Amino acid sequence: MAYIIENGDNLEVSVVNFESLFTLADYKIVIPEYQRPYVWSAAKVTELLHDLKAFFKKENPLNYYMGTLLFHQNDKQEAKLDDGKRPLSIIDGQQRISTLLLLYFAIHAEEKYKSLTYSANLEYNSPLSKQSLRNNHQIITAWEHINDLKEVENLFSRLTFTVIVTKSEDDAFTFFETSNNRGVKLSPTAFLKAYHLREIDNKHEELQRTCARRWEKIERLKNSISGSRDFIDVLFNTFLWRSRKWRGSNIEFENQDYLLQEFQKNAISAKSIDKIELYPNRSNMLATHLQLENDMGFRLHGSTIAFQGRSSDFPFLMRQPISKGLNFFLYAEKYAELVHELFNGHRHKDAQIQQVQKLYSEVYKHISVYLKEVFVLCISMYYDKFHTHKIVEFAHKLDYAIGAVRIEKKYIFKQAALKFFRDSNLNLLDVIDQAYISEEVLSFFENNVDIDKMYQVDYAAMKNGVQKRYLESVLTYYSKAEHELKNRKTW
C-alpha cells in the first residue's frame, strides 16, 4: 500500500479510505500496549452515526473525511508477529477505527468482516474496552436509521483519512502525546502509563504487557475516598503528587502540567530495564537495588533476601526519586495497594489499623471531602514511614488538628487542605518525611495554641449544621459527652 514506508525516509503521508487500511501484505494493524482503552461514549457513537446519515443523504457523491490517523511502522526483525508479519501500531485513531469496525460488522455479514480485518491484530485486553465495545455494538445495531447507512453505496470506501506513518518511535510518541481523537483527550495518568510503558523497550514486550495489566488492575479499584473520580486519578493527584510537592509553605494545587513534570520529566533514566535503585528507609537498611526475576518476582541486592511480600511492602518511600519504566509502575502499584488496604472499607488484619479504619469510618466518611483527603494523605504518609508504630495515637492527634478546622469553618473549601499544611509553623508532611522516630511527629501537635482555642467555643450555639454533625460523630467515637469537648486535647 502507498502509505507503507518503502524508502529510507522516516515519514509517509497519504490519503486512504477505510477499507484500504486493511489491505496490507506484510503488516498487521495492532493496538500497542501503551494505548488507552477504547472509551467512546454512546453520545459520541450516536453523533457519528447521525453525521454519516446527514452527509450521505440525497446521494451525496463526495467522500466523508474522518481526520488523521497516525501509525508507527516497526520493521525491526525482533518485532515480527507470530505469522511473520510486522506490526503497524495505531498511535492516534484507535477510537475511530474501532467504532467504524463495529459499524462495518453491523452492516455486513461476519465473513466479510473477517475478510476485511485479516490484516489486523486488534486485541482489546482492557475490561473497559471490552465493555465499551459491547455497549456500542448494541447501540449501533439498535439504531433506528441503520438501514439508511446500509443503503449507501460503497460506504466504507468513501470514508477517507489522512494517514501518517512514521518509522521513528520518538516521533510517534510525540504525536501520541499531543493527539486528540475527536475530543477524547488523554488524562495525565493515561499519558504517564503510555510514557513509562514506552521506556520498557520492545525487547521486553512481556514485561510491558504485565505492567499494562497491573496498571489496569489499579484503574479498576473502587474509589471510596474522593467523590466519583477514578481511583488512579485520585491516587496521583490527591495523594502522590501532594505528598511529594507540598513542601514548606510555598505550595499550590496540582494540575496536568505539574503531574507530567513530576512523574515524567523529573523521572530519572533507569540504568537497567529490570533493575530498580533503592534508597535507605525504615523497610530497607541494606539493599541497594531491586532485581526483577522470572514471573515478576524480585530479589533485594546488597542483601540476600528474596522479596515475597505484597506490593504495598515494596521498600520505597513516597518522596524518593522515581526511575522511568518498571520503577514507575511498581511505585504506583505500591501506593495504590497501600491506600486501598487502609481506606477501602475492608477490615484490616492489624488491630491498630482497624482502630484507624474505625475512626475514618465513623468520623471522616461523611466529612468534607477536602478534610477527608488531608486525613488520608497524612495517615498514608505516616504508615509508609513508621508502619503501625503509634499510628492510633497519631490518628487521634491528627483528628484533633483537622477537627479544629471543621469547628472554625462553617463552609470548607478546597483551599482548606492547602492551608492546613501551609499556614502551620512546620508543614506536617515535611515533619513526617524528615522524622527519624514517630515521637518527633507526635510532638508536632503539642503546644499549638491556635488548635486549642478552637475547642473553647460555645458548642451550644452550633445548630444542626455540618459542624454540629462532626462534633456528634466525634463524641460517639470517643464515647464522650459534649461538656468534655473543651478538654479534648487530653482524650
Image (cartoon, rainbow, N blue to C red):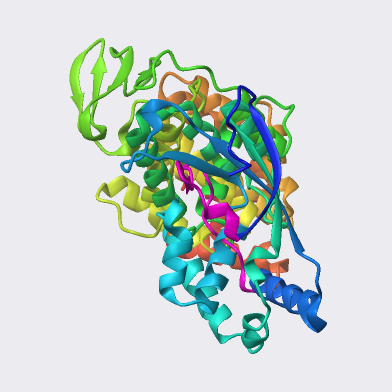
Q: Position of residue 48 (x, y in %)?
A: 70, 70
Q: Residue at x 45, y 41 (%)?
A: 26
Which residue is more in the foreground, 100 or 132? 100
Tag count: 0
Please determine whether, in this image, residue 114 is positioned above or below residue 9: below
Q: Residue at x 21, y 29 (%)?
A: 294
Direction from residue 36 to residue 291 in the image, left or right: left
Please determine whether, in this image, residue 107 is positioned above or below residue 450: below
Q: Is any part of residue 426 visible from this angle?
A: yes
Q: Position of residue 68 (x, y in %)?
A: 71, 49
Direction from residue 306 to residue 348 in the image, left or right: right
As for residue 21 lying within the magenta part, the answer is: yes
Q: Position of residue 278 (x, y in %)?
A: 38, 17
Which residue is more in the foreground, 190 or 395? 190
Question: Mostly what secondary structure, the magenta segment?
Answer: loop
Image: magenta residue range: 19-42
Q: Residue furthest bottom?
A: 144
* Quadrant containing the N terminus in the rendered view: top right
Kindly indicate the quadrant of the structure image that contains residue 127.
bottom left
Which residue is more in the foreground, 213 or 434? 213
Please determine whether, in this image, residue 138 is positioned above or below residue 38: below
Q: Residue at x 34, y 25 (%)?
A: 315
Q: Is any part of residue 399 visible from this angle?
A: no
Which residue is more in the foreground, 436 or 489? 436
Q: Position of residue 452 (x, y in %)?
A: 64, 42
Kindly indicate the quadrant of the structure image that contains residue 466.
bottom right
As for residue 385 lying within the magenta part, the answer is: no
Please determine whether, in this image, residue 298 is positioned above or below residue 367: above
